[in-house]
């Protein structure tokens, strides 16, 4: 069965979309079949993968596709009409050399969908648990429709604790937490430790009620068990000392603060969950990947719809810099970053 992974932090600007896109590319390059689900109303992952023009066309309703060709085409009929909608799956513009990489595009309508979902009515009462596992239903139908068995389903999420985040976490086997070197990341890591046990407690309460009248349900007993897969240190700066890269002083200090928050706050809070083991034995306090600040290369990657590991084969866009080729130090950093994403993919293959 596919392993479902959410990339999540309630703090914005930590690089969730860039990380999930490049991680998916590395997993596919290692021969894995990967499905991306854009569950963020900002839809940045869809734009990065497909380009703004193709994505804009998919939003438009047509007689053949009255709800467009995004996540809305499944979710809206399911919520409003209690019937299975359509799942539209697309190839990113940059195809991996091996494996498969598909995406179910997001939709700005997800803002409305997050308001429709109700924790008290749907989750705690147990009467609408299936409304909260739409990412699972979408990935199942995508597999059936495309006659493919995905190895990994990766979900991109908004920076909040809203119902979309709950929905994805309830569907997830693991979640990864990107953090940047700033004063808020350590605080937000602590908040995740505080909030997730409440999410799980709500699910357990609703699940117990639901299973009283649906004791043979094959899906619900196995949902609501998201495990912390580790954190990613993203966007830090370095300097060379005797030819060896080191995090600059301020960023190194923030690194230590996040480690302290993981060790002293997040892990103890998640460890107190009794319904399942939320902290796997392979997870420690240090980051599972370290992605250096890419400066203009990150936005250029999105504008060109090319993942970082292939970006050195392209020319920079003139909108970002008035030059026709990347500098040698930029190419070196791209390649170092590609290696780090490959290592992160290997970590997931080995442990998840």
Image (cartoon, helix red, strand yellow):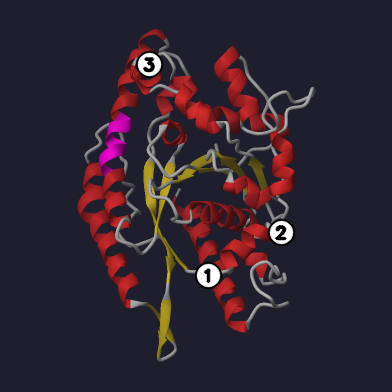
Q: Residues within 10 Å of mark 1 (few under 14, many from 20)?
A: few
Magenta portion: prevailing SS class: helix
Where residue 269 appears, as percent x and y from the top left, is 23, 43
Residue farthest toward the top in the current orientation of the protein? 213
Q: What quarter of the picture does the N terminus occupy?
A: top right
User: Where residue 12 sits: x, y (%)?
Assistant: 42, 50
> SS for tag 3?
helix
- The local secondary structure at tag 1 comes to loop
* Mark nearer the viewer, 2 or 3: 3
The label number, if any, that marks residue 121 in the structure image: 3
Q: Could one spot residue 139 in this view of the protein?
A: yes
The answer to whether residue 295 is left or right of residue 176 is: right
| Figure check: 89 above or below 114 | below
Name the spot of residue 4 as percent of width and height, x first.
Answer: 50, 40
N-terminal of the pair, mark 2 or mark 3, is 2
Quarter of the image holding residue 178?
Answer: bottom left
Q: Which residue is mark 2?
A: 97
Residue 150 position by quadrant = top right
User: Marks 2 and 1: which is nearer the front?
Assistant: 1
The label on residue 189 is none
Q: Nearer the viewer, residue 133 or 221?
A: 133
Give the label on residue 295, or none: 1
* N-terminal label among 1 and 3: 3
Q: Is residue 90 visible?
A: no
Residue 288: percent from the left, percent from the top? Answer: 40, 60
Q: Alpha-carbon distance for marks 1 and 3?
A: 45 Å
Residue at the (72%, 34%) spot, across then down: 146
Numbered range of the magenta stretch: 193-200
Q: Are marks 1 and 3 in contact (CB under 8 Å)?
A: no
Q: Is residue 195 magenta?
A: yes
């Amino acid at each position: 069965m596919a392993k479902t992974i959410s990339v999540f932090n309630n703090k914005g600007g930590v690089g969730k979309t860039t990380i999930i896109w490049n991680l998916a590319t590395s997993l596919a390059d290692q021969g894995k079949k990967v499905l991306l689900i854009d569950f963020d109303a900002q839809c940045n992952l869809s734009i990065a993968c497909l380009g703004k023009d193709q994505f804009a066309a998919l939003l438009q309703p047509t007689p053949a596709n009255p709800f467009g060709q995004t996540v809305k085409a499944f979710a809206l009929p399911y919520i409003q009409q209690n019937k299975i909608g359509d799942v539209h799956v697309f190839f990113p513009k940059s195809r991996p050399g091996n494996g498969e990489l598909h995406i179910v595009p997001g939709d700005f309508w997800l803002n409305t969908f997050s308001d429709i979902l109700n924790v008290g009515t749907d989750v705690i009462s147990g009467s609408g648990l299936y409304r909260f596992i739409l990412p699972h239903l979408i990935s199942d139908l995508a597999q059936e429709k495309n006659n493919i068995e995905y190895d990994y389903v990766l979900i991109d999420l908004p920076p909040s604790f809203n119902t979309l985040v709950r929905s994805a976490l309830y569907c997830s086997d693991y979640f990864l937490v990107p953090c940047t070197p700033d004063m808020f990341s350590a605080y937000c890591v602590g908040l995740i430790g505080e909030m997730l046990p409440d999410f799980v407690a709500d699910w357990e309460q609703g699940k117990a009620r639901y299973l009283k009248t649906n004791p043979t349900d094959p899906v619900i007993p196995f949902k609501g068990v998201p495990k912390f897969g580790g954190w990613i240190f993203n966007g830090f700066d370095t300097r060379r000392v005797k030819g060896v890269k080191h995090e600059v002083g301020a960023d190194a200090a923030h690194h230590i603060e996040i480690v302290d928050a993981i060790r002293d706050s997040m892990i103890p809070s998640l460890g107190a969950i009794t319904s399942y083991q939320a902290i796997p034995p392979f997870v420690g306090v240090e980051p599972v990947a370290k992605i250096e600040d890419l400066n203009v290369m990150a936005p250029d990657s999105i504008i060109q719809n090319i993942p970082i590991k292939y970006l050195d084969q392209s020319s920079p866009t003139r909108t970002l810099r008035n030059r026709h080729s990347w500098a040698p130090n930029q190419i070196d950093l791209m390649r170092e970053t590609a290696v780090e994403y490959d290592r992160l993919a290997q970590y997931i293959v080995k442990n998840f």
